[in-house]
Amino acid sequence: MDGLKRDQLEVEAINNANGDTENITEKEDTEKEMAPPVGSSIHRSSSRPQLDLSGAAIQGNFEERDPTILLPNQSDDISHLALDIGGSLIKLVYFSRHEDRVANDKRKMSTKERFGVTNFYGRSFPILGGRLHFVKFETAKINECLEFIHSKQLHRGENDNAVIKATGGGAYKFADLFKEKLGVVIDKEDEMHCLVAGANFLLKAIRHEAFTHKEGHKEFVQIDHNDLYPYLLVNIGSGVSLIKVEGDGKFQRVSGTNVGGGTYWGLGRLLTKCKSFDELLELSQRGDNSSVDMLVGDIYGGLDYSKIGLSASTIASSFGKAISENKEIEDYRPEDISLSLLRMISYNIGQISYLTALQLGIKRIFFGGFFIRGHAYTMDTISFAIQFWSKGGAQAMFLRHEGFLGALGAFMSYEKHGLDDLRVHQLVERFPMGAPYTGGTIHGPPLGDLNEKISWMEKFVRKGIKITAPVPMASPKTTGLGGFEAPSSKGDALRCDESNLNVGVLHLVPSLEVFPLLADPRTYEPNTIDLADPNELEYWFTVLSEHLPDLVDKAVASEGGTDDAKRRGNAFARAFSAHLARLMEEPAAYGKLGLAYLLELREECLREFNFFDAYSTIKQRENEASLAVLPDLLMELDSMSEETRLLTLIEGVLAANIFDWGSRACVDLYHKGTIIEIYRMSRKKMQRPWRVDDFDAFKERMGFGDKKPCFRHKRALLFVDNSGADVVLGMLPLARELLRRGTEVVLVANSLPALNDVTAMELPEIVAEAAKHCDILRGAAEAGGLLMDAMINTQDNPSEKLSSTPLMVVENGCGSPCIDLRQVSSELAAVAKDADLVILEGMGRSLHTNYNARFKCDALKLAMVKNQRLAEKLIKGNIYDCVCRYEPAQLVES
Ligand SMILES: Nc1ncnc2c1ncn2[C@@H]1O[C@H](COP(=O)(O)OP(=O)(O)OP(=O)(O)O)[C@@H](O)[C@H]1O
Ligand SMILES: CC(C)(CO)[C@@H](O)C(=O)NCCC(=O)O
Ligand SMILES: [Mn+2]
């Protein structure tokens, strides 16, 4: 039925096992055509694993190097293209999959052995991830669409009878053309059904999908899944459909109007001679409709007609002025005409929607369709109409995927893709640069490779403001009497659609889970710093911009400093700057904006330009330097009493957290001494009380209080931060202490590199090095399956090696310096179930994202604050102040 071959997974695993390179190459070639070339493996494309691993099981011999893995829940014939062919635009939703080959993950044995599970969360088999891409074309240029599909081979089926789901009138009109040009059969889906299915899916599965837009202000609406229906869906395409939605598949098209997006664009084109829809919309931003419209004041000699609630500036009659004056079309400014037309149509649709909602007794109205086009003034106008007529009783809401509802619905009509079962935490939206590359532009073919993408970036930036500038609309002024004045912002360019920075690529990641130890996932908010405050936003944008040149240097050096690396480095800098510029203008463009999101965006952007690990050299150097002094540190610790040692260990964690290449102040420091010198200096300065100091409470919990029986945690999850001293001299000694007390320790580290953070892949080697000098660590690492060589040596007596308390490593599922605990790896979720202590270390994980997070188990948050502003804001302190926040388990009502 479609291009993804059945049993592909099994075949690939077998190929790998047999070393069948010929087949692999062939597969890679197909993959190149199928999916964007950059990011053909997860490690280069996304910070999330992308495969449904639930219920996965190894087939055959467990000890085989690359055994076949069966993934019963990963549908292997996911349909991957659906269309909505409307009167004006063709919307295309397609699915791409990626593979991942990470060889020799030492943790895979340990995880399996420890938990004795048939579920297999290791990563040494190919991973096929999934992403939904959203693309649109003008219907008049259907050939471009056909070329796009062909060039990406999206129509290729398993056999020759490929079937593509399509909705919209064009599914009928162009069925023969598709057969002729692509040899595919169009399977027609009902348009209204698809619109509703798409809207329901988005409202339930995407966290920041719906928003209100009033007087220039966008606000995301938290949708309560249990209180979604009924709602009125108003789809403003060429024409307008009004649909009452009462449930999944339960709806009725209650009304419609022929005055819609096609009317604005069609009439506008005739009247202004505009060449594109965007040009017309942009004109409206510089328009003054009072020269075209007849206002109440025109009729009432400048007065309000306040008795019936109409201000002088209210439009009495759209285009009404054109009757009384002796003017021809040339005598009117196209700008004024465009605005007048836009207001006429938006008000009209708003009014009809309100009347329909009133008639049906519905309070919530969602607007979709590409007429909206994320345009602030259009949304404000519609919102105003709803607000005005309903006197505040009804609410207009908009959808970020506005025009893609039908196409998404058609995509969902394929059976067996499991899309409708996906939950919010299993979807990650990303905003890659280079829209044409992912197919995000209306014009032109998709870009073929990274090189083309970089060229596109270069052009993108040369066009400068025209493309990158969003829609900067100042709040429209209202008189309070129903009048609605012209937009006050003049001369601003409309954000060009070409940049496509409003709808991202939707990553479907069925293996992500909500961290089970969160006390209340519903109220959990992974951003301590809300960037809704413009000052905050500006500050962090400056920090990130200033850090950019240094980051580019590191990234380029990490790839050998070649010309190619430099070019990619520049493209990355441009891409990230463009994202920053876009967000600076419209912070909510990609959903609700928080600092954690920005930091993750930066890492994603690096990966997009093939920088896999910008800090690899630095990480290695710091690991080596720190491992060299570890034995001395351990000896020093062992000479202390248990109580003194606990304090020294916590001090050590805080002191070693100074090594953070994401902090400018610290990077400046590093030029002033060696790692060890800085570490010593940092430790010397550790004076209690720290700015946040719950150490005594923690100590007491650990059994050092008065007469309390010694308490021992069963399992501790240590969320580690940076490589080098941070993990080696800070967290590892703490882990060792817990192990010594009989607490199992799980080191939780990033799945993918981010800044100088240590990754789960790197940890086993570091632990193995450390274990050479420490029996406790060695025994624990062996028991936890981290020392593969050692395990092989003790193979005869496996029970012996499992006798000590195990030290394990799991990946957290992300590739950012922060962690959103609503979306963690299933591996982490599995080990968390038996944990009773969580230790979060470092600014990103314990402050930026989880300072206010509450857990069902004991939690310790440790960080040195390496940013003056954050210190002031969060702890009313200063840079280099320390946080040791201890919170006992929260009681949770179940
Ligand atoms: N780049 C664009 N080119 C043309 N129209 C655009 C563009 N961007 C936004 N629009 C607006 O979006 C409208 C089309 O919206 P949409 O794609 O939702 O409808 P459609 O499916 O083509 O129409 P219908 O559902 O009535 O068949 C156009 O009529 C125009 O007002
Ligand atoms: C004809 C459709 C459904 C095609 O998408 C749309 O353009 C529409 O709803 N037009 C409005 C027709 C009417 O109800 O007056
Ligand atoms: Mn349509």
Image: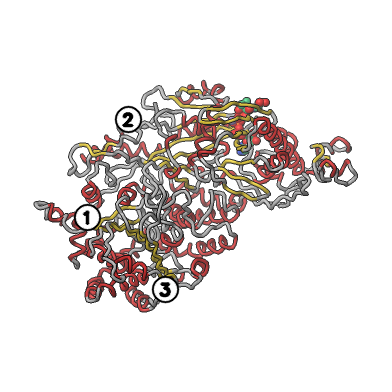
Q: Quadrant of residue 377?
A: top right
Amino acid type, mark 1: Gly
Residue 600 lies, in percent from the top left, at 45, 54
Closest to the observer, 457 or 297: 297
Horizontal relation, residue 87 to residue 709: left or right: right
Secondary structure of residue under mark 2? loop
Q: Residues within 10 Å of mark 2 (few under 14, many from 20)?
A: some
Label 2 vs label 1, nearer the camera: 1
Horizontal relation, residue 873 to residue 350: left or right: left
Do the CB atoms of the residues marked 1 and 3 lie less than 8 Å apart? no
Numbered label attached to residue 690 = 3
Secondary structure of residue under mark 3? loop
Numbered label attached to residue 226 = none
Label 1 vs 3, first from the N-terminus: 3
Residue 630 lies, in percent from the top left, at 25, 71
Which residue lies under the disc numbered 2? 6
Quarter of the N terminus within the rendering: top left
Residue 7 lies, in percent from the top left, at 30, 32
Which residue lies under the disc numbered 1? 784
